[in-house]
Amino acid sequence: MPEADSATPKQFQPDIPVAQAPFYVKGANSYDWGMQNRLSRIFRPETGRTVMLAFDHGYFQGPTTGLERVDLTIVPIAPYADALMLTRGILRAAIPSSAQNGLVLRASGGPSILKELSNELLAMDVEDAVRLGACAVAVQVYVGGEFETQTVHNLTKLVDAALRYGLPVLGVTAVGRDLVRDARYLGLATRICAELGAQVVKTYYCEADFDQVTAGCPVPIVMAGGKKLEELAALRMADQAIAEGAAGVDMGRNIFQSDSPTGMIQAVRRIVHDRWTPEDAYELYRSIRSGAVGGGE
Ligand code: R5P
């Protein structure tokens, strides 16, 4: 027989209403608990933003510069990222299972850099993503690309499969060589991803009217870093993207190809979460690079 419940008066406190806080991630208010919880492991509750470290490039370009040894270059800086965007192969092979980051797993693939890149198919079952503890799965969408419809269909198939598990989908707008990365194109591509069910969209920054791209997308946009820039320029781009409505960054080469990946990721973090100026963040990067403050190479 279990012990009888205590006879002391119960504390229902009927004068205190139950809190009904809206969920803080854009467009996510009506999602189920599991979906919201996974998003909260990507977007920090304190700021509503994320520093996602992207190093999934090997899925189509093999041993990318800076990613030859993920165990040596990425694992040491991973604790500075809120979330990691990577393939399941690298996750199992190189990332300690004690990692505390939210995981965004690449779920599309097919062609290598030797072929037409837009000819992708889904490349992972969502069950395996759940088995690995993923917080989201990512799929490339080539709006305007040769295999546009196929990649949009990849997105919708993945959304349908992932919804069964409360797993968010990150739609990645891939811009083909012949397409202009302006607000009109990025607005088109990001909105299509969101309309068709992506709970988060990743896209590039554009100098003019990026705020219209973020405003026109009903779910959070995270900024892709793109090709390696000089460090201060990359930090300025991240700052502008946040100022113009991005909910964070999903940067790869501008971090792991820097001469101080540790310095860069900490500088990016200061911009995204603490809204430091790019100049102050750059000074932090320089100090870490030179070993003047913790984390130097
Ligand atoms: C590209 O297809 C991958 O999704 C990369 O993760 C993405 O391009 C972000 O990396 P980067 O900041 O190097 O552009």
Image (spheres, grey):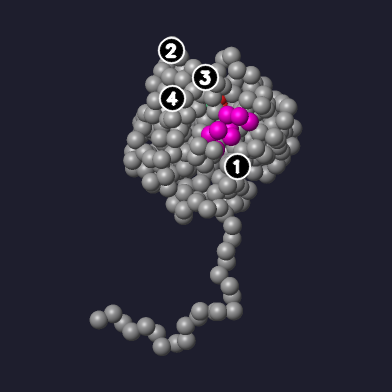
- Residue 272, placed above or below residue 178: below
Residue 63: x percent and y percent?
A: 44, 19
Precedes in sequence: disc 4 or disc 2:
2
Residue 265 seen from this side: no
Precedes in sequence: disc 3 or disc 2:
2
- For label 4, being within 8 Å of ligand 1 is answered no
What residue sits right under mark 3 in the picture?
A: 145
What residue sits right under mark 2 in the picture?
A: 115
- Residue 193, placed above or below residue 147: below
Whether the magenta-drawn stretch holds residue 192 is answered as: yes
Question: Which of the image's four quarters has the C terminus?
Answer: top right
Precedes in sequence: disc 4 or disc 1:
4
| Residue depicted at 39% across the width and 25% down the height | 121
- Residue 65, placed above or below residue 169: above
Q: Residues within 10 Å of mark 3 (few under 14, many from 20)?
A: many
What residue sits right under mark 4 in the picture?
A: 150
Predominant secondary structure, magenta span: helix
Which of the two residues, 208 or 235, is positioned nearer the viewer here? 208
| Residue depicted at 43% across the width and 11% down the height | 114
In the rendering, which numbered label is found on residue 277?
none
